[in-house]
Image: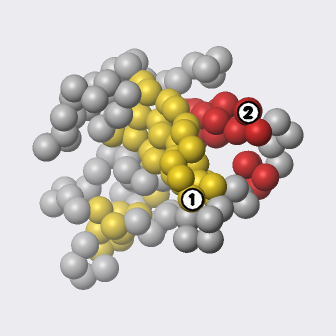
Amino acid sequence: MSETLKPCPLCGSTDIACFAEECGDDYDNVPTFRAVVGCRGCHEEDCDPSYDDEPCFGIEAYFSANHPLVKDCEDPWDIERVLERHMAERWNRRAERTCRMVDNGCELCCSECDCRHDYDDEPNYCHNCGARVVGA
């Protein structure tokens, strides 16, 4: 991949994985692709660091064949490269976007993507959209 990836915002590691792969079909038999970018240096509890290509902290997304990034790809062999480039851009933009953790009474939710966080303390970055958490 030609895109230079920024270091991990949590541990500072430059050992960043970025890949995309076809992962099967959805319920309508439409091909689905999985794209991941993240740090191999951060290891969450119960993480097995022996899986070298699977980062523990990062951003994971699934794209169906109907998604514009996939559908507009002229050469089907380029789909994985297009998705890798997209994820690298998301990873590198993560510090530019900000969010807040909103307490909905029983859990914290990201103000940007509404994903739920199972943290006792607020995270530095949203584990789903990668936005930097600022203030309450």
Q: Which residue sits at x=82%, y=36%?
A: 75
The structure residue drawn at horizontal position 40% and vertical position 18%, both measured from the top left corner, is 14
Mark 1 secondary-structure assignment:
strand
Question: As drawn, is 39 to the left or to the right of 19?
Answer: left
Q: Which residue is mark 1?
A: 25
Give neighbour class at mark 2: few <14, some 14-19, many 20+ (Cα, 10 Å). few
Q: Where is 71 relative to 7, above or below?
A: below
Tell me which label, 1 or 2, sits earlier in the chain: 1
Q: What amino acid is at disc 1?
A: Asp
Q: Which mark is residue 77?
A: 2
Q: Amino acid at mark 2?
A: Trp
Judge whether residue 97 can be spotted in this image: no
**Residue found at x 32% / y 46%:** 124
Along the viewing direction, whichever of 88 and 136 lies nearer the viewer: 88
Could you tell me which quadrant the N terminus lies in? top right
Instruction: Tell me the CA gap for discs 1 and 2.
Output: 17 Å
Q: Is residue 136 above or below residue 39?
A: below
Q: In the image, residue 2 lies at what x, y percent? A: 65, 17
Q: Where is residue 53? Give x, y as percent.
A: 37, 28
**Disc 2 secondary structure class:** helix
**Splitting the image into 4 quarters, where does residue 106 fall?**
bottom left
Way the structure is coloured: secondary structure
**Quadrant hosting residue 65:** bottom right
Of 4 and 67, which appears nearest the observer?
Answer: 67
* Quadrant of the snapshot with the C terminus: bottom left
Q: Along the horizontal axis of the image, is 35 left or right of 30?
A: left
Q: Position of residue 92 (x, y in %)?
A: 55, 33
